[in-house]
């Protein structure tokens, strides 16, 4: 008996869809699309090499409007001319019968690309900021809120048309919807404002309800709506929202949308082992455990962040139904196969340039964002430094 067998068991989502094993290829932008976000052959080759890496795969963030673009050379889903490329991406990811989800995101004030392109970004409240360059955060009017909700709807329709099995709405650390939920960022006094949790939650819930309506109208009945979030926002010991507030929030999300999973994500090391800083009964307990207990089997939970070995995957599965890995699948797309073949000792997270072609990693990749891997340290330093060299291969 393989001690890692629990990780290889199939899982049924609430809508009846079967996932082949407990692994999820979590979203990771490779920065290898065109400048305007269209899918390239390099994107497709990378996805093809990983189409059988995990039972479920989620693309890197696709931006739903130009002001929401998280990373340069990331996926665009903001206009219909993106659909042909996205269709090829969906076909490629699904070629081995695994599940292909596209992540829809709006980066709000953390869109470095919008800062560069337009000198301004959107958020719940006005700010003047200096990094990476002088820029303004424009407080979203109700009209702008409604237009972003329309953008989410249009992006969902495009994802359905392209043939993805589902969409994932991410409100994880730093993305636009999270900044509305956050008392750090949200200083508004209107019905989307800071005064009550219901007000701070409103924008995200309106997005989820609108996306669900599009799915009900246009998608096959087993289309998957996923949700990615950070259950507690922390700055030192200060909290932008507590884990209790998050648990209430996720219940509200489940009231307005038929979500099929919750994926937990944040920045930092060993995220899946994070402990709660919310004062009270949860303080010091694992964040994943608190949320897992709260869900109580109503929804599959995906743990992620710092899972980079069979042992850590098994550990994470104690408080989750599935485990997500991002950086490990960059350098070891065959992780799960080696585990299933009783060869866990052959799992190799190291990388040298000689393996670039075999791993189908684009020659120009991860522009400016290997530092994101530095936060997590899921791959060792030498490997991150080797990947960092790929950012010198861009034309500009
Ligand atoms: C280079 C890079 C790109 C990423 N792109 C995305 C993204 O597009 N969407 C997203 O939700 N998370 C993104 N992430 C976060 C990862 O999904 C994940 O949460 C993080 O890397 C920790 O998981 P890991 O230890 O398995 O790598 C990215 C992380 C890195 C390092």
Image (tube, helix red, strand yellow):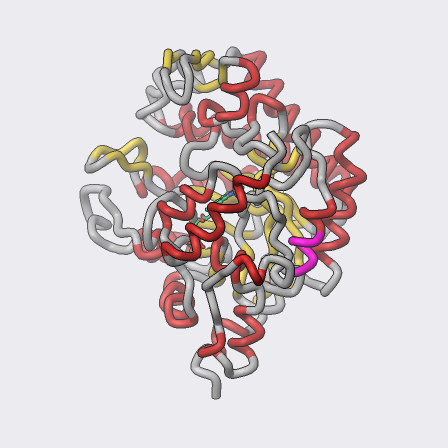
Magenta residues, start to end: 45-49
Q: Is residue 236 left or right of residue 100?
A: left
Q: Residue furthest bottom?
A: 1
State the image coordinates of residue 284 (x, y, percent, origin top left).
20, 52
Which residue lies at the image location 26% right of the left edge and 48% below the top edge? 276
Q: Is residue 256 above or below residue 25?
A: above
Residue nearest the observer in this picture, 197 or 366 = 366
Residue nearest the observer in this picture, 140 or 295 = 140
- Evaluate whether residue 168 shows in this view: no
Q: Main secondary structure of the magenta part?
A: helix
Q: Is residue 28 above or below residue 348?
A: above
How many numbered marks are there? Answer: 0
State the image coordinates of residue 354 (x, y, percent, origin top left).
57, 61
Which residue lies at the image location 59% right of the left edge and 18% below the top edge? 146
Which residue lies at the image location 58% right of the left edge and 70% below the top edge? 10
Magenta stretch holds residue 67: no
Classify residue 320 by image quadrant.
bottom left
Residue nearest the observer in this picture, 256 or 181 = 181
Q: Is residue 114 above or below residue 166?
A: above
Magenta stretch holds residue 47: yes
- Quadrant containing the C terminus is top right
- Evaluate whether residue 59 shows in this view: yes
Which residue lies at the image location 50% right of the left edge and 81% below the top edge? 343
State the image coordinates of residue 99 (x, y, percent, origin top left).
66, 57
């Amino acid at each position: 008996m393989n001690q890692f067998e629990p990780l290889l068991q199939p899982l049924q989502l609430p809508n009846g869809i079967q996932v082949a094993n407990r692994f999820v290829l979590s979203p990771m932008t490779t920065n290898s699309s065109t400048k305007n976000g269209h899918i390239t052959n390099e994107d497709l080759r990378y996805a093809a090499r990983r189409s059988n890496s995990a039972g479920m795969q989620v693309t890197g963030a696709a931006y739903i409007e130009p002001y929401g673009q998280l990373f340069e050379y990331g996926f665009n889903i903001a206009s219909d001319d993106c659909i042909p490329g996205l269709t090829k991406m969906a076909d490629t990811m699904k070629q081995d019968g695994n599940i292909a989800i596209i992540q829809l995101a709006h980066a709000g004030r953390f869109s470095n690309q919008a800062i560069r392109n337009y000198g301004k970004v959107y958020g719940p409240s006005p700010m003047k900021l200096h990094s990476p360059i002088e820029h303004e955060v424009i407080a979203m009017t109700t009209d702008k809120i409604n237009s972003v909700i329309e953008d989410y709807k249009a992006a969902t329709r495009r994802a359905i048309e392209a043939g993805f099995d589902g969409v994932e709405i991410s409100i994880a650390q730093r993305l636009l919807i999270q900044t509305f939920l956050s008392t750090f960022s949200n200083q508004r006094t209107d019905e989307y404002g800071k005064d009550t949790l219901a007000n701070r939650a409103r924008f995200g819930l309106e997005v989820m309800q609108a996306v669900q309506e599009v799915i009900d109208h246009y998608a096959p009945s087993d289309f998957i709506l996923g949700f990615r979030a950070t259950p507690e926002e922390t700055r030192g010991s200060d909290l932008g929202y507590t884990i209790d507030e998050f648990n209430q929030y996720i219940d509200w999300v489940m009231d307005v949308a038929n979500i099929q999973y919750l994926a937990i994500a944040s920045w930092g090391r060993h995220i899946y082992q994070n402990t709660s800083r919310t004062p009270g009964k949860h303080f010091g307990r694992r964040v994943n455990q608190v949320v897992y207990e709260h869900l109580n089997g109503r929804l599959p939970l995906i743990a992620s962040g710092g899972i980079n070995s069979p042992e850590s995957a098994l550990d994470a599965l104690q408080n989750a139904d599935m485990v997500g890995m991002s950086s490990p699948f960059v350098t070891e797309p065959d992780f799960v196969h080696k585990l299933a073949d009783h060869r866990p000792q052959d799992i190799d997270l190291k990388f040298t340039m000689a393996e670039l072609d075999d791993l189908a990693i684009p020659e120009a990749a991860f522009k400016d964002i290997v530092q994101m891997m530095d936060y997590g340290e899921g791959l060792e330093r030498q490997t991150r430094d080797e990947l960092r060299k790929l950012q010198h291969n861009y034309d500009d």
